[in-house]
Image (tube, rainbow, N blue to C red):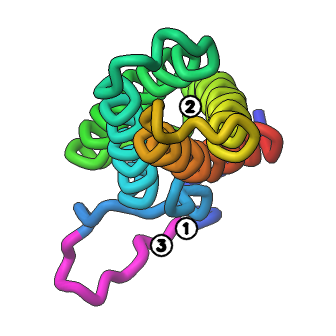
Amino acid sequence: MSVSHASIHPVEDPTTTDGGNNNAPRVRMKDIQGMPGTKGGLALRLSQFIFAVTALSVMASTSDFPSVTAFTYLVVAASLQCLWSLCLAIVDIYALLVMRSLQNYRIVIAFAVGDGIASTLSFAAACASAGITVLINNDLDSCADNHCLQFETATAMAFISWFSALPSFLLNFWSLASR
C-alpha cells in the first residue's frame, strides 16, 4: 500500500498575515463579473429587467398595439424577458448573500439555454417592431394617426434589453464551453 505519511511528507499549514482570519470568502478565477452569482451579473439582470419592463409598459400603454402582430410579439417577448431576468436576479441576490458560486454544470446549462432563448426572442421582437415602426413612420406617413413615439420608445427599450442580455448569454455559454 503506497500511502504517504505525515512524517515522511510533512504538510505545512499556510501562514496567515491577517491574524488568523481564515473565514474570508475565496474568489475563484472563473467568477468573472457578469456571470451568475456576481455583482456584475446582478447588475446585468437588473438592467435587463428594467429595460424590458419599460418596453412592456410603454407598448402596453398604447391602445392600438394588439392590431399589429409584431407589437403583440414584443409585449410577449418583453414579458418573458421580465420574468426570466427577475427570477435570475433573485437567484443572484441569494447567491451573493450566502456567498455561493453558481458554477454548477447543470445551473450553467439552464442559465445559458434560458438566456439564449430569452435574448433571441427579445431580439426578434425588437427587429420585427422596428420594421413595423419604420413602415408606419417612413413608408405610410401615418404617424399622426398612430402612437409612433411610443412604438419607437418601446422598440428602443427592447433593443437595449437585448443588448444587456447578450453579455449574460455569452458569459454563460463561454463558461459552459470552457469546461
In the shown orientation, is residue 68 left or right of residue 15? right
Q: Is residue 156 magenta?
A: no
In the shown orientation, is residue 178 left or right of residue 142? right
- The crowding category of the residue bearing disc 1, from other C-alpha atoms within 10 Å (few below 14, some 14 to 19, many at least 20), is few
The CA span between labels 1 and 3 is 6 Å
The first of marks 2 and 1 along the sequence is 1
The CA span between labels 2 and 1 is 33 Å
The first of marks 3 and 2 along the sequence is 3
Residue 12's mark?
3
* Amino acid beneath label 3: Glu
Front position in the image: 107 or 100: 107
Front position in the image: 92 or 158: 158
Residue plotted at (36% across, 58% down): 39
In the shown orientation, is residue 141 left or right of residue 174? left
Residue plotted at (23% across, 85% down): 18
| Disc 1 element | loop
Q: Give the labeled residue for mark 1.
A: 10
Residue 169's mark?
none
Which percent across, then down, holds residue 83? 38, 22
Look at the image and give the residue range highlighted in magenta: 11-21
Q: Looking at the rendering, which quadrant does residue 27 occupy?
A: bottom left
* Amino acid beneath label 2: Asn
Residues tagged 3 and 2 counted as in contact (Cβ below 8 A): no
Residues tagged 1 and 3 counted as in contact (Cβ below 8 A): yes
Front position in the image: 33 or 56: 56
Residue 104's mark?
2
Is label 2 or label 1 in front?
2
